[in-house]
Amino acid sequence: MQTPLLAVDAVILFGSGIVLIKRKNPPYQGSFALPGGFVEVGETVENATKREAREETGLQIELLGLVGVYSDPKRDSRGHVVSVAYLAAGKGELASGSDAKSAEVFPLNSLPALAFDHDKIIRDALALAKSRLDNQIKVD
C-alpha cells in the first residue's frame, strides 16, 4: 500500500513579521519557504512542527491554531506530500540550522516569492489570525 508522505509547516509570527527560511536543499533550493519538514514515525504533527521550527530557526514556538491541511498531489515535486500547517508565535533568538541556509523575518507587506504553496498557507494563516483578533476585540 502506498500513501502520501506527511509534512508540517509553521507560519511563525516573530517581531514585526513572519519567519521564512532559505532552503538549503532541493526542491526549491535557494528559495524562501516556511519552516517545516516531514513528520517522523511515532511523532505527533504538533511535536513535529515544534521540532522543525527549532531545527530550522532556533526558535521555540507556541502553536496558536491549525491553519489547514494542504493535500494537492502536485504541491511537491518529490511526490504526494500532505502538509499540516500551524500558526505559531516564536520566542528566542533567530538562527538558521538544519535544512535552512538562512532564517529571516519578513514584514507582511514585502514577502518574497515562496516555494511550494506557502503563499496560500500564509494567506490562510493571516485570515485565521485576523479572525481570532476580531473575535477577541468584539465587545457585547
Image: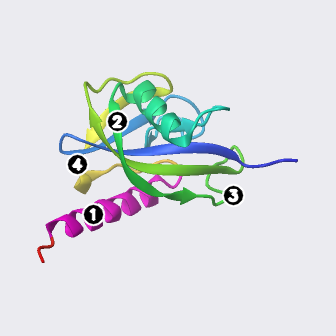
Colouring chosen for the image of the structure: rainbow
65 or 25, nearer to the observer: 65
- Using the numbered discs, state the Cα–Cα distance from disc 3 to disc 4 in whole angstroms: 30 Å
Question: Which label number is shown at residue 73?
Answer: 3
Query: x, y percentage for residue 73?
Result: 69, 58
Q: Quadrant of residue 19?
A: top left
Q: Is 74 situated left or right of 87 in this image? A: right
- Name the residue beneath numbered marker 4: 107
Quadrant containing the C terminus is bottom left
Q: What residue type is labelled 4?
A: Pro
Q: Is 88 situated left or right of 50 in this image? A: left
Query: x, y percentage for residue 35?
Result: 44, 38
Instruction: Give whichever of discs 1 and 4 has the lower sequence position.
Output: 4
Q: Is 114 situated left or right of 94 in this image? A: right
Disc 4 residue crowd, few under 14, some 14–19, many 20+, Cα 10 Å: some
- Using the numbered discs, state the Cα–Cα distance from disc 1 to disc 4 in whole angstroms: 20 Å
Q: What residue type is labelled 2?
A: Ile
Please state the extent of the stretch shown in magenta in the rendering. 116-137
Q: Answer yes or no: do the residues labelled 2 and 3 have beta carbons within 8 Å?
A: no
- Using the numbered discs, state the Cα–Cα distance from disc 2 to disc 3 in whole angstroms: 28 Å
- Name the residue beneath numbered marker 2: 61
Q: Main structural element of the magenta stretch: helix, strand or loop?
A: helix
- Name the residue beneath numbered marker 1: 132
Q: What residue type is labelled 3?
A: Pro
Query: x, y percentage for residue 6?
Result: 64, 44
91 or 44, nearer to the observer: 44
102 or 36, nearer to the observer: 36
